[in-house]
Image (spheres, helix red, strand yellow):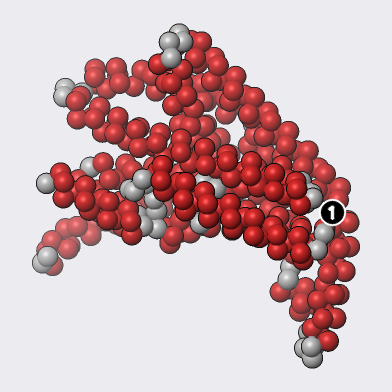
Amino acid sequence: MDSNTLRSQSPGFMVALAAFIVIVAGMRAAQSLVVPFLLAAFVATIFAQPLIWLKKKGLPGWLAFIIVIIVIAGLGIGFGAIIGESITDFSESLPFYQARIGTLMQSIQSWLVGIGVEVPADILSSYLNVEAIMSVSAGMLSGIGSMVSNGFMILLTVIFILLEAQSSPAKIRKAFVNPTVQLSYLQNFSQKINQYMGIKTITSFITGVVVTIWLTILGVDFPLLWGLLAFLLNYVPSIGSIIAAVPAVILALIQIGPGTSILVIIGYLFINTTIGSILEPRFMGRGLGLSTLVVFISLVFWGWVLGPVGMFLSVPLTMMVKLALEIKEDTRWMAILLGSDTEVEALTESIATEK
């Protein structure tokens, strides 16, 4: 590539970069408007497949639509009740946990002194700031709870999205001279998104249920809350399971003791290894994954732009971008860069097959 070509492409790159910065700044400024819409799109994507399935079973379109909307409303009310009640109970129990944290710090300091290591209490507290970790977890759940409290607007948006999705193919046929290509792209993209979101939702639900049962058996407080957190953060591969486990492990340590905390760790490791490394790859297949670095960057980026809900939606949003990029041949190289090693191999094989 010569210098003239570089000079001709640089203005386009700078314009694209400036547009990206303006869009990100606008999304961050309009967070209160963007987040409910993205959450509604996320919910609509998940429930589009059950709507199609009910229609295939012979139910009239209007009846299938009403059933799906009632299920969405019921789940939203249930999630909001669990989060609201658990956060209230957690706030009421906070003095007890703070006292337990003080006792735990004294025990750790006494143990260190016993082995000949003297560490000032303020330094130990700064390195083992358990209260900060628990407050971050509560803040994340509060952010999600605030979105659930805005449930009527989200539900209304979901209704319009599902109604609009049903008429999209007809609009594309009328809007384009040769709609076959556009419909093919849309169907391919929708199929991959539905496959990814459907399987991920089922495995996340299983993860949340098993975590709740395990924590209930161990006697850890608020098992429903930590199970819900495990369900939500399971949409974030690798990193999400670690983030979901931290507050439950710390609470088990504060509330009961180190033995129970170790059992909680073992349970989370077994659950996430079984579901994330065995079940998901078996049903998901290759070509539907992101590299660990991309997952981490998307978690930080979307969390910064959209807050706690952005962290929850980070990987689904990035996955949608990746699937959209790999549909067209001229943008598939960007999808390859976003994918993990196995997904890169799968995309390379698909390109070779097409050629």
Return the x and y of residue 181 as percentages of the image width and height. Answer: 19, 30
Residue depicted at 71% across the width and 42% down the height: 224
Q: Nearer the viewer, residue 140 or 218?
A: 218
Quarter of the image with the N terminus in it: bottom left
Q: Decide which of 39, 90 is in the foreground and name it.
A: 90
Q: Is residue 139 visible?
A: no
Q: Is residue 344 visible to the viewer in this orientation of the structure?
A: yes
Across and down, in percent, residue 4 comes to 11, 63
Residue with the mark numbered 1: 94
Q: Is residue 235 above or below residue 161?
A: below
Quarter-of-image position of residue 45: top left
In this orientation, which residue lies closer to the viewer: 283 or 175?
Answer: 283
Q: Residue furthest bottom?
A: 116
Q: In the image, is 192 to the left or to the right of 255?
A: left
Residue at figure coordinates x 26%, y 41% from the top left = 327
Q: Residue at x 33, y 59 (%)?
A: 341
Is residue 151 rendered to the left or right of residue 163?
right
Circle 1 crowding by C-alpha within 10 Å: few under 14, some 14–19, many from 20 = some
Residue at the image point whose x is 34% and y is 48% from the top: 286
Compared to 342, does 210 lie above or below? Answer: above
Residue 164 spot, x, y in % from top left: 41, 21
**x%, y% of residue 195?**
39, 36
> In the visual, does 215 lie left or right of 202?
right
Give the number of callouts. Answer: 1
Q: Say if 107 sits above or below 73 in the image.
A: below
Q: Amino acid at mark 1?
A: Leu
Q: Secondary structure at mark 1?
A: helix
Residue 310 to residue 147: above or below: below
